Amino acid sequence: MIELRMIERWEEEQKDLWFWEKIGRYPFALLDRITPKLVQDKIGQALDELGAYIQTGGQYLINEQRVLDQLAREAGLAPGSLAFSRIQDLPLAILNRTSDQLKESRIEIAKYQGATTGIGGVFTLAIDIPVLLGLSLKTIQEMALAYGYNPREKQERIFIVQCLQFASADYVGKQSILKNLSVGPQGETEREAISQIQGWREVLATYRDNFGWKKLFQLVPVAGLLFGAWINKSTIEEVAEAGQMLYRKRRVLEKLDKFYQSEPS
């Protein structure tokens, strides 16, 4: 119950965008018109790849063994000895520690990747859009695996994209997504779930806005590198936290449900 209250408090803290962030979105209607075709093509490619991820997993599916071995080490087991089906029975503290470690690892990767693309010109910035999307999807998949959910299942991939939406949404959007996620992917048909995530194009709009900021800051020496590192680090930090908390909530609720079902009536 303490874990559940912590998660609910986190949900309450998901307030609207900071004032400067809201203002910062306005110039990008103009930036959209002057964005090079190369970047527009990369945005379109990222949209296609996100759709392919939902349908088949595409190139973004990760190898689950790394996460299983990390969970095993936290549980005091030998690497390679933990089966995926046993994750749900591990203590929540082990799942939480593992997800924290995975989150920190991905944040570090994002920071260095962002610094590289923040200073390398329009071509590396164009590459940054699908790379950052891929890193975001892989990060949430690791959060899913850390709590015992399989991203190879289509319904789980839909949940993962909804987590990605949540990280990019404003306050109203977050509340709507939380409502959709409250029953979990098993509580809706595939058609209903896919219909609910039609707004995933907004996620790509956020990545486009990040590109715009990097493009502007490239005009100042060193600033492109520093801002690229900061904004990619912040993006993955938000994505990882959203995935971690939403998957933690599902696991807590399922453990509570299992506990109450086992109690004598």
Image (cartoon, rainbow, N blue to C red):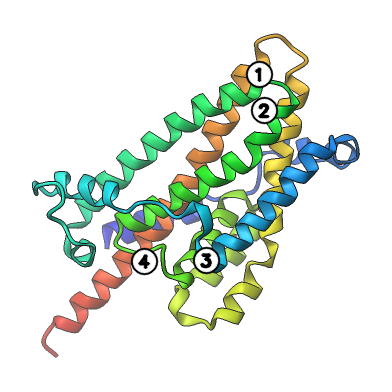
Cα–Cα gap, marks 3 and 1: 34 Å
**Mark 3 or mark 4: which is in front?**
3
Which amino acid is tagged 4? Arg
Number of marks in the rendered image: 4
Residues under numbered marks 3 and 2 in contact, where contact means CB atoms less than 8 Å apart: no
Would residue 234 be found to the left or right of residue 152 on screen? right
Chain-order first, disc 2 or disc 1: 1
Q: Name the foreground residue: 186 vs 252.
A: 186
Q: Tell me the residue that label 3 is attached to.
A: 56
Residues under numbered marks 2 and 1 in contact, where contact means CB atoms less than 8 Å apart: yes
Chain-order first, disc 3 or disc 1: 3
- Badge 1 crowding class, 10 Å Cα cut-off, few under 14, some 14 to 19, many 20 or more, is many
Q: Tell me the residue that label 2 is attached to.
A: 124
Q: Name the foreground residue: 96 vs 69.
A: 69
Cα–Cα gap, marks 2 and 1: 8 Å
Snapshot quadrant of residue 104: top left
User: Residue 127 at x, y = what percent?
Assistant: 65, 35
